[in-house]
Amino acid sequence: MIINHPLLGSRDSSEFVYLGDASLIDRPDWQAEHAAEAFYDYAYLRDNPAGEHRELWFHEGGDRSWLVVTRNTVTHEISKVELARDVARAQGRSK
Amino acid sequence: MRYSGFKVIKEALTGHKGWKPVWRDPEPKPHYDIVIIGGGGHGLATAHYLAKIYGHRNIAVIEKGWIGGGNVGRNTTIVRSNYLLDGNEPFYEFSLKLWEGLEQDVNYNAMVSQRGIINLIHSDAQRDAFTRRGNAMILNGADAELLDAEQVRKEYPFLNFNDARFPIKGGLAQRRGGTVRHDAVAWGYARSADGFGADIIQNCEVTGFRIEDGKCLGVETSKGFIGAGKVGCAVAGNSGRLMGMAGMRLPIESHVLQAFVSEGLKPVLPGVITFGAGHFYVSQSDKGGLVFGGDLDGYNSYAQRGNLPVVEDVCEGGMALMPMIGRARLLRMWGGIMDMSMDGSPIIDRTDIDGLYFNGGWCYGGFKATPASGHCFAHLLARDEPHPTATAYRFDRFRTGRMIDEKGMGNQPNLH
Ligand SMILES: Cc1cc2nc3c(=O)[nH]c(=O)nc-3n(C[C@H](O)[C@H](O)[C@H](O)COP(=O)(O)OP(=O)(O)OC[C@H]3O[C@@H](n4cnc5c(N)ncnc54)[C@H](O)[C@@H]3O)c2cc1C
């Protein structure tokens, strides 16, 4: 698989380390009332779709940026690559 | 029809005209006591034990393709019970004992071959860890033997003992481990279950569940609605997809694992060797091909094929361990979809939906579990309580922190 890195262009997927579902960006608030339940959900449960999947890849053998890759889990086709930083900011994760 | 040596001779003398189809090809009935989804090893074994041990006859196995087309026909056929943790080892040893009696139990030749398995050791720390594991195995009634480098050399003189990074310093052997002809396991269990009256319905895909007031009443399929008193799901890599139809999210990700076979060679490998440090393991099939594999590709996948970086990685592992493998040609390779759980261990449990039961999360090691998984799932379906060897395989262990994490990797399925 070739991952089209937003900053570095086409890179072989073997330069990357895979983490998993991009929902891992949405870390729950540890002080919220139902935090334990929210963390159980966050840490262990997955949608695991057959089809389009947004997922986190780390460019370990490159610029060490985190990417959100949209990839089809049935065909392995990659349709979109974003910097995880941009995705997280757009979701209001940090300033 | 019973199979025997006598029957083979009789058929040979009469032109092989008396062999019959090994199982029927029935249309689904409107209602069964128990419906099992998934005609892989686990689903078919469940049907066999439900019938034979728990006396259920009005049951069906529903398979979307043909039986044996999933992981049961794609794995590298290794069976063993060399686990460390309490939740696992009694279950896998129960399974190995069932393998030892399988062919008589189902009256089918599954080529169960206890040719032994050796996990290689490269360092003092690893020897300590394997010594502990061996002791845990022995405490649970399994067999284990610690070998030094010379003992390994006697059995496998051609291995690369002086590799600069991973010199071979010994091994943990389980002599009762080995290989089993995987397709024959599916066929043998199918034939036995069919003989007890279970319907094996192929080319019938489950497309949904009928759930009313928190109770599962049956399944919607490509051949119409099939009612059921209880429904058991055993669809391995498709677990997430199937349980999603019942509104459930699972502690499971689907990943692809590849396997490889070389051209046929004269006998060279007497048993199974695992080179964990190099992400490589190998055995030799009775046809002569070297059967080998390594790690997961590492990303979520429902494609039954992998990518080239892992092919390279596995072949490098092979070259590092037994350089002569480079002289053999690679004949075939394929992939299967693994139901990778969050702690690397399986689930055999009820769900929150009445009448709906789940069996999955087998990761890359569910073939060896086939007999015990079938037996324990049948027990759960028949009695509504877990089998004594499978009490730890609960859904709620992730919520309560009772993980069974053999590798100590945490909630990252692609690392188990
Ligand atoms: C390359 C590879 C190597 C492996 N090596 C080993 C090994 O050496 N030792 C070991 O112990 N394990 C090994 N495994 C793991 C082992 O094969 C699996 O854990 C085990 O086979 C899974 O259980 P099963 O046989 O029931 O799965 P499957 O055979 O996959 O059965 C599941 C069935 O469910 C069906 N299904 C799915 N969705 C539906 C639906 N909606 N409706 C109806 N039917 C459906 C599928 O078509 C499939 O036939 C390996 C796996 C792979 C891929």
Image (cartoon, helix red, strand yellow):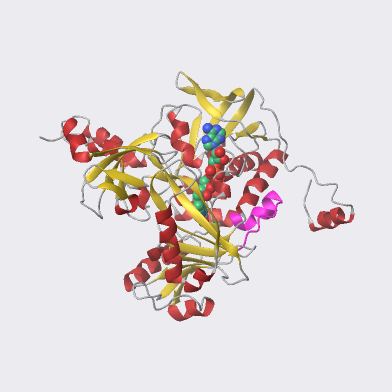
Q: Locate residue B3, reporting x and y percent.
A: 77, 51
| Number of numbered discs visible in the structure rendering | 0
Q: Specify the farthest residue to the left.
A: A95
Q: Residue at x 60, y 55 (%)?
A: B99
Counting from the top left corner in percent of width and height, residue B384 is at 51, 35
Residue nearest the observer in this picture, B374 or A4 = A4
Above or below, B227 relative to B241? above
Determine the image quadrant of residue B129. Answer: bottom left
Residue farthest to the top, as pictured = B213
Residue A65 position (above or below residue B262): above
- Asked whether, in this view, residue A7 is left or right of residue B343, the answer is left
Q: Residue furthest right?
A: B14
Task: Please indicate, yes or no, whether residue B125 appears anywhere in the rendered image.
Answer: yes
Q: Position of residue B270 (x, y in %)?
A: 58, 70
Q: Residue at x 21, y 47 (%)?
A: A65
Which quarter of the image is occupied by the N terminus of chain B?
A: top right
Image side of residue A91 versus residue B91, left or right? left
Residue B101, magenta (yes or no): yes
- Asked if residue B23 lies in the magenta stretch, the reply is no
Front-most of residues B12 and B191: B12
Task: Please give the range of residues in magenta.
Answer: B99-113
Q: Looking at the picture, how far across and down is residue B75, in whole percent?
A: 54, 52
Which residue occupies the foreground of this view, B244 or B394?
B244
Residue sitting at 64 percent across and 53 percent down? B102
Q: State the residue in front, B367 or A62.
A: A62
